[in-house]
Image: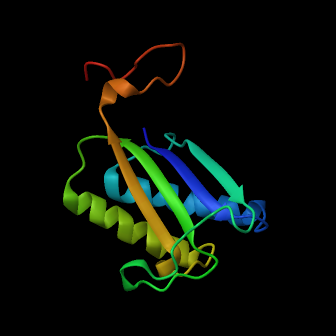
């Protein structure tokens, strides 16, 4: 049920985006029990000057390659699961496509289950 939005600087190519998507999805499956077929991802490429990421907020030195990852998920994950997810996303993205861990910004947005419709105008998770 996660909806993943990834914002990157333009010009990296489809293979780069595919590697990001795969690394994030594998991380979700490994840490917060997302099923393999539950994959919904949106990639937005930004020209220079249209993606603002502070280069040193909280003492973390970010490069021009920094990305923003926003994941909307249903309520119910523990703090430990969330921490494991953040760490695993950074680890996997460091391996493929080779991002620096410092360049991986992740934000979770939690919603109640009745806020999802996966098609047919039905709230499939309402009441569960």
Q: Nearer the viewer, residue 70 or 89?
A: 70
Q: Nearer the viewer, residue 89 or 61?
A: 61
Q: Nearer the viewer, residue 99 or 18?
A: 99
**Numbered label tally:** 0
40 relative to 101, above or below: above
- Name the residue at 33% across, 52% down: 32
122 relative to 74, above or below: above
Instruction: Determine which quarter of the picture holds residue 30.
Output: bottom left
41 relative to 100, above or below: above
| Screen quadrant of the C terminus | top left
Residue 19, image x, y percentages = 64, 64
Residue 121, image x, y percentages = 51, 13
- Name the residue at 42% across, 78% down: 57
Residue 88, image x, y percentages = 40, 69
- Name the residue at 63% across, 63% down: 51
- Name the residue at 43% across, 62% down: 106
């Amino acid at each position: 049920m996660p909806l993943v939005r990834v914002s990157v600087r333009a010009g990296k190519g489809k293979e780069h985006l595919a590697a990001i998507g795969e690394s994030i999805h594998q991380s979700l499956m490994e840490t917060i029990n997302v099923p393999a077929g539950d994959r919904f991802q949106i990639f937005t490429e930004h020209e220079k000057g249209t993606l603002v990421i502070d280069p040193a907020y909280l003492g973390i030195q970010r490069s021009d390659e920094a990305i923003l990852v926003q994941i909307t998920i249903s309520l119910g994950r523990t703090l430990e699961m969330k921490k494991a997810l953040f760490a695993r996303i950074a680890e996997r993205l460091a391996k493929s496509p080779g991002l620096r861990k410092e360049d991986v910004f992740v934000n979770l947005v939690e919603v109640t289950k009745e806020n999802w419709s996966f098609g047919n105008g039905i709230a499939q998770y309402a009441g569960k």
